[in-house]
Image (cartoon, rainbow, N blue to C red):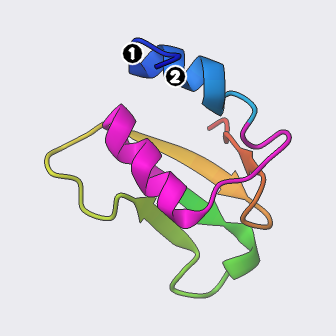
């Protein structure tokens, strides 16, 4: 109700994620579906395991744009610059 569209929602409620709070796994799925993007997270604390790179959602309904994030602890996220 406080946001008329996904961009406003992100700016109003999701902008502080990674700086002051983290997201649970279910929140990542909801965020990916709401924005219709595939969120690929590289979890540095899971290096050399099959859970190092995970996607939210794992299999989107169609081809969605993909964004990448890094996390050192599963609570704080960073946007890599390639």
- Indicate the position of residue 58 as horizontal and vertical percent values: 33, 64
Q: Position of residue 57 (x, y in %)?
A: 35, 58
Q: Which residue is mark 2?
A: 9
Is residue 39 part of the magenta span, yes or no? Answer: yes
Q: Is residue 58 above or below residue 48?
A: above
Residue at left offset 68%, top offset 80%: 46
Residue furthest left in the image: 62
Q: Residue furthest bottom?
A: 49
Q: Nearer the viewer, residue 42 or 7?
A: 7
Extent of the magenta region:
17-40
Where residue 75 appears, as percent x and y from the top left, is: 76, 59
Q: Residues within 10 Å of mark 1 (few under 14, many from 20)?
A: few
In this figure, which residue is indicated by the disc labeled 1? 5
Numbered disc 2: secondary structure: helix
Residue at image position (72%, 65%) is: 74
Looking at the image, which residue is at 41% across and 11% down?
4
CB atoms of marks 1 and 2 within 8 Å: yes
Looking at the picture, does residue 9 appear above or below residue 51?
Answer: above
Q: How many marks?
A: 2
Residue 31: x and y in percent read 45, 43
> Which mark, residue 18?
none
Q: Quadrant of the C terminus?
A: top right
């Amino acid at each position: 109700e406080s946001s008329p569209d996904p961009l406003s929602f992100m700016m109003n409620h999701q902008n502080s994620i990674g700086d002051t709070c983290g997201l649970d796994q279910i929140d990542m799925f909801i965020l990916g579906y709401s924005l219709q993007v595939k969120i690929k997270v590289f979890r540095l604390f899971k290096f050399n395991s099959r859970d190092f790179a995970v996607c939210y959602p794992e299999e989107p309904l169609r081809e969605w744009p993909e964004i990448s994030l890094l996390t050192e602890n599963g609570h704080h996220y960073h946007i890599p610059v390639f």
